[in-house]
Amino acid sequence: MENKKIMLTKENGQKLFVDIYEVNKSYPNVLTTQFNINIDDYPQYYKPFAELGFNIFAVQLTGSGKSGGKRNHLTPEIAYDDIKTVIDYIVKNYNDAIHMYGVNGNGGIYGQYAVSIDDRIRSCALYGVGLHKDLSYIPNHKQLYVIYPIIKMLAKFFPGLKVNSKKQANLDILEFPNVEKEKELYKNIEEKYIDFWNIPLIWYSSFIGLFLEDDSKLKNKPKCPILMFVPEYDRFFSQEYLNKVYEWFDEPKKKVDLEGACHSFWALNSEEVCKIAAEWFEENP
């Protein structure tokens, strides 16, 4: 196994950081995304795929970590362009057996967005999903439908404004088995990335638009088989919401109910989650 840290150059000249664990160029490939932290600070979240016989490509989305671009420039379209850039690289330098692993909520939704556009992805495992025109997983979501045009306008004129998202994360009211492990995980992240919870308003506006804009590609059905993780104690996504999205997906699909699991189960139990995803990828070569 060889670890390669490379910079890809996008068509617009921007640099895109990708952390690669290469097992064999003829082996199937897994592409995963990350935003807000340096992706290669936490290789344990995706490295298990390499030990399971996959080349792994972890891409740092625009405006975060070692990738170029400003953090507030990330839109769903740019996130897909990042993913497309890595897919193009894999097809050219490895092979066309590519699978998507979307985790940590935002990464899952951006992964879903990508597979609703690009038919080169063989299958997908998602730890976070979204339903077009449905923000019901967000607290006080009914207000967002009304004030979204205002948020959009403010973001246009004051893109540097930031929204603190920590309250939405519900960290102070978590109650479930092993809750202290998740709190400790986020405590360590907060210490390392002091601006972790402060999200630029323009990014927040773009993310809400991903759900609410009429032309959002999130309204499209994924073009590949979908595996969806449903943690029992996800502090962002209720089981009701996740099951609603799952019912909307077309076959072939599979739902994995993670009993006793929290939102960060994918990080705290990465080997287990990667193994489940790898089995799905093998079923859909």
Image (cartoon, rainbow, N blue to C red):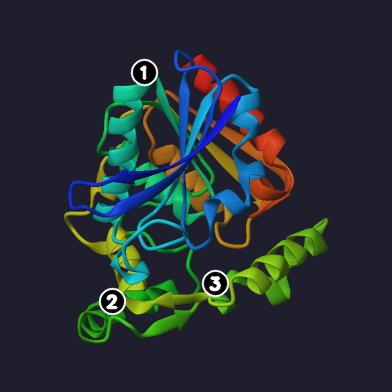
- Mark 3 or 1: in front is 1
Q: Is 236 situated above or below 101? A: below
Position of the C terminus, as image quadrant, is top left
Which label was assigned to residue 60? none
Q: Which residue is mark 3?
A: 196
Left/right of residue 201 with respect to residue 149 in the rendered view? right
Q: Cα distance, mark 2 to mark 3?
A: 23 Å
Mark 1 or mark 2, which is nearer the start of the sequence? 1
Disc 1 residue crowd, few under 14, some 14–19, many 20+, Cα 10 Å: some
Left/right of residue 41 with respect to residue 250 in the rendered view? right
Which label was assigned to residue 95? 1
Q: Which residue is mark 2?
A: 148
Quadrant for residue 132, please give it: bottom left
Q: Residue at x 43, y 62 (%)?
A: 64
Mark 1 or mark 3, which is nearer the start of the sequence? 1
Residue 85: percent from left, percent from top:
28, 40
Q: Cα distance, mark 2 to mark 1?
A: 42 Å
The amino acid marked with disc number 1 is: Asn
Per the image, label 3 sits on a secondary structure element best described as: loop
The amino acid marked with disc number 2 is: Tyr
Per the image, label 2 sits on a secondary structure element best described as: helix
- Mark 2 or 3: in front is 3
Left/right of residue 120 with respect to residue 186 in the rendered view? left
Q: Residue at x 38, y 20 (%)?
A: 94
Residue 33: percent from left, percent from top:
45, 46
Q: Is 62 situated above or below 89? A: below
Disc 3 residue crowd, few under 14, some 14–19, many 20+, Cα 10 Å: some
Left/right of residue 268 with respect to residue 213 in the rendered view? right
Per the image, label 1 sits on a secondary structure element best described as: loop
Q: Residue at x 53, y 57 (%)?
A: 38
Mark 3 or mark 2, which is nearer the start of the sequence? 2
The amino acid marked with disc number 3 is: Phe
